[in-house]
Amino acid sequence: MLATLFVPSVALLVPLHLTVVDMSMINAFWAVWLPVGANAFNILLVQQFYVNLSGEIFEAARVDGAGRSGCSS
């Protein structure tokens, strides 16, 4: 995943367009954010956000009635 950060985004423009065309998502909302959302930098950014959440947020959610399904802390 780290190696994909070294590839310039301009070099990925044509392969991403061909992927969107092959998946027949030309006029779909998914074609706009799926290639960008699956970018390695964005994945690392979201992962670091969830790692840095404090335990107080999870405790407040439990007080409000949230369950533990899908929670890894």
Image: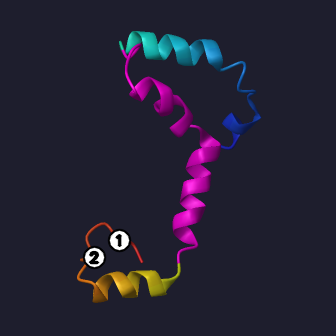
The residue located at (27%, 84%) in the rendering is 64
Label 1 environment density (alpha carbons within 10 Å; few <14, some 14–19, many ≥20) = few
x then y, percent, for residue 55: 47, 85
Amino acid found under the numbered disc labelled 2: Arg
Q: How is the image coloured?
A: rainbow
- Quadrant of the frame with the C terminus: bottom left
Residue 56, placed above or below residue 24: below
Highlighted range, magenta: 25-53
C-alpha gap between disc 1 and disc 2: 5 Å
x then y, percent, for residue 35: 52, 29
Amino acid found under the numbered disc labelled 1: Cys
Q: In this view, does 69 lie to the left or right of 72?
A: left
Residue 38 visible in rendering: no
- Cβ–Cβ below 8 Å for labels 1 and 2? yes
Query: Is 50 inside the magenta-drawn segment?
Result: yes
Q: Which quarter of the figure has residue 52?
A: bottom right
Mark 2, secondary structure of its residue: loop
Which residue is under mark 1?
A: 71
x then y, percent, for residue 59: 38, 87
Q: Which quarter of the figure has residue 23?
A: top left
Residue 35 visible in rendering: yes
Tag on residue 48?
none
Label 2 environment density (alpha carbons within 10 Å; few <14, some 14–19, many ≥20) = few
The residue located at (40%, 81%) in the rendering is 58
- Quadrant of the frame with the N terminus: top right
- Closer to the camera in the image, 22 or 36: 36
Which residue is under mark 2?
A: 68
Mark 1, secondary structure of its residue: loop
The residue located at (55%, 56%) in the rendering is 46
Residue 57, placed above or below residue 9: below
